[in-house]
């Protein structure tokens, strides 16, 4: 074989190889809208709360607030009670028992407060003293022995009006009326209180609250 023919054969083989290596164009496909079922993506709808659900939410919030308020009141009740009872005034009670000399009986001073009463001074105020012979001492005289006492919470102190030290008893007492005033301090604050009218007569031989016994 001649050189010329060999060159031609090589060139033919190279052409075949290049043809084989060149990729064939892909066939174009067109979408047919009638044949293709295109479905839109599913979208979540926004749920609008109903009136009943809104009402139940509001009621649950209100119930929660009410529970908080009740809990706070329950927790503060002991503090409120202590603060309220701290300013209670002493109770002045007539002495029990019967005796011919009304001013030898001791009156009771009870402290209902949760705080002690300090620097308490008890002052008796004479309203009227009538004797068996009909003589009377009608005056608004105050008298006290000057004793300063302290009354602890829920405790009672006794005090006797020293009438005999300031006035001359002219005979047997038929009737007497007095009030008792107390000056004291609570947490350093000056306070005072005065009792109701106490009456004594020779028939009952005991002190009682109320109007003068006829």
Image (spheres, rainbow, N blue to C red):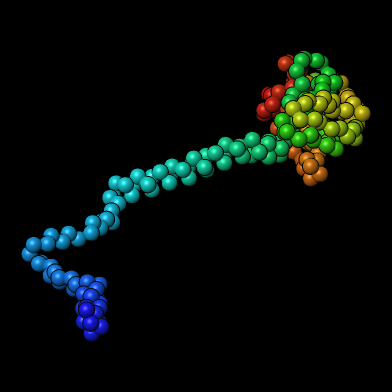
Apparent side of residue 5 relative to residue 176 in the rendered image (left or right) = left
Query: Horizontal and vertical percent for residue 164?
Result: 90, 26
Viewer-nearest residue: 59 or 105: 59
Residue at (24, 80) in percent of width and height: 6
Quick one: quadrant of the C terminus? top right
User: Can you see residue 5?
Assistant: yes
User: Can you see residue 92?
Assistant: no
Q: Relative to residue 85, is residue 14 depicted above or below?
A: below
Residue at (74, 27) in percent of width and height: 154
Q: Relative to residue 192, is residue 42 depicted above or below?
A: below
Apparent side of residue 207 relative to residue 168 in the rendered image (left or right) = left
Residue at (13, 60) in percent of width and height: 37
Query: Horizontal and vertical percent for residue 17?
Result: 24, 73
- Which of the 4 image quadrants contains residue 76? top right
Quick one: which residue is furthest to the front in this view?
1
Q: Relative to residue 114, is residue 30 depicted above or below?
A: below
Query: Horizontal and vertical percent for residue 188?
Result: 81, 44
Quick one: which residue is furthest to the bottom in this view?
4
Quick one: quadrant of the N terminus? bottom left
Quick one: which residue is furthest to the left in this view?
34
- Which of the 4 image quadrants contains residue 130? top right
Query: Horizontal and vertical percent for residue 120?
Result: 83, 36
Viewer-nearest residue: 96 or 187: 187
Viewer-nearest residue: 145 or 88: 88
Residue at (23, 75) in percent of width and height: 13
- Which of the 4 image quadrants contains residue 182? top right
Viewer-nearest residue: 98 or 117: 117
């Amino acid at each position: 074989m001649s050189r010329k023919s060999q060159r031609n054969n090589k060139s033919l083989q190279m052409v075949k190889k290049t043809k084989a290596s060149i990729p064939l164009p892909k066939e174009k496909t067109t979408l047919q809208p009638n044949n293709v079922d295109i479905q839109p993506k599913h979208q979540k709808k926004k749920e609008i709360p109903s009136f009943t659900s809104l009402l139940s939410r509001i009621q649950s919030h209100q119930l929660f607030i009410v529970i908080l308020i009740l809990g706070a009141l329950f927790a503060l009740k002991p503090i409120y009670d202590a603060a309220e009872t701290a300013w209670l005034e002493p109770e002045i009670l007539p002495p029990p028992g019967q005796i011919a000399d009304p001013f030898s009986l001791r009156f009771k001073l009870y402290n209902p407060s949760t705080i002690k009463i300090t620097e308490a001074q008890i002052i008796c105020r004479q309203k009227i003293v009538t004797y068996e012979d009909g003589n009377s001492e009608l005056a608004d005289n105050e008298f006290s022995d000057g004793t300063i006492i302290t009354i602890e919470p829920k405790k009672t102190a006794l005090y006797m009006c020293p009438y005999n030290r300031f006035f001359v008893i002219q005979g047997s007492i038929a009737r007497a009326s007095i009030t008792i005033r107390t000056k004291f301090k609570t947490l350093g604050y000056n306070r005072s209180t005065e009792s109701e009218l106490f009456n004594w007569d020779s028939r009952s031989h005991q002190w009682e609250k109320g109007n003068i016994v006829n």
